[in-house]
Image (spheres, grey):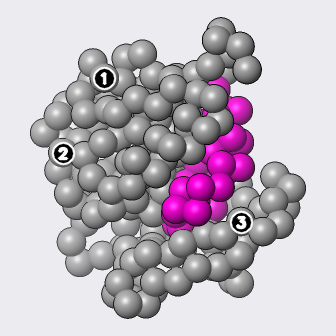
Amino acid sequence: MTISSRKTIGILAFHGDVIEHENIIAGLGHNPKQVRTPDDLKPCDALIIPGGESTTIGFFLEQSGLMEVIRQKSRTGFPIFGTCAGAILLATHIIDEIVPPHLGIMDITIQRNAYGKQIDSFYADIRIPELGIKDLKAAFIRAPIIKKVGPEVKVLAKNGSEIILVQQKNLLASTFHPELRGDGRLHRYFIGLIKG
């Protein structure tokens, strides 16, 4: 990979699996950058919102001034990938007694902690036929479930009958953690959404 083809991939760094995403991005030959402020986001070609605690991340998005900046950038075709809590923050509709501050930019309805508590977390081998992926080891940790998708949202993968990976133009959301086993195939697809 030439220097000119390397992209700077922002990783929202308030909470969650930041280092794991950084390692994958670096392993793919691109430049990871931790993002905590609007200025941090300026040089980035795309943004990953990692798993973690969605209420905590949502609070810091508001306090940092990033909430509206990310909303505006999403409308320009800027790629954003939300994993687990990140998928919750992208959703327009959240099913929960306490709805966290969220971006509301992806036309999905999602249910928080849908599988139960931490003890109910699990791994599953999943298939993403459209991407030619047959054996991605996905971690579901206090994972949400996507209950409904809008007309512009493409379902890329399911686990049984449950929707676990969706795309709406430049937005990608997974209810699982693809980064914990160091598998970079989904990240490579995401980086491919960058224009230019």
Residue 121 at what x, y percent from top left? 46, 84
Q: Quadrant of residue 116?
A: bottom left
Q: Nearer the viewer, mark 1 or mark 2?
A: 1
Q: Within 10 Å of the Cα at label 1, are there few (<14), some (14-19), or many (20+) other Cα atoms? A: some
Q: Nearer the viewer, mark 2 or mark 3?
A: 3
Query: Which sits earlier in the primary sequence, circle 2 or circle 3?
Result: 2
User: Magenta residues, as a range?
Assistant: 165-194
Amino acid type at image mark 3: Leu
Query: Which sits earlier in the primary sequence, circle 1 or circle 2?
Result: 1
Q: Within 10 Å of the Cα at label 3, are there few (<14), some (14-19), or many (20+) other Cα atoms? A: some
The answer to whether residue 128 is seen in the rendering is yes
Query: Which sits earlier in the primary sequence, circle 1 or circle 3?
Result: 1
Amino acid type at image mark 2: Phe
Question: Label for residue 40?
Answer: 1
Query: Horizontally, is 19 left or right of 46 in the view?
Result: left
Classify mark 2: helix, strand or loop.
Answer: helix
Residue shown at 38% from the left, 48% from the top = 18
- Per the image, the residue denoted by label 3 is 136
Mark 1 and mark 2: Cα distance apart in space: 14 Å
Residue shown at 59% from the left, 55% from the top = 182
The answer to whether residue 148 is seen in the rendering is no
- Per the image, the residue denoted by label 2 is 60
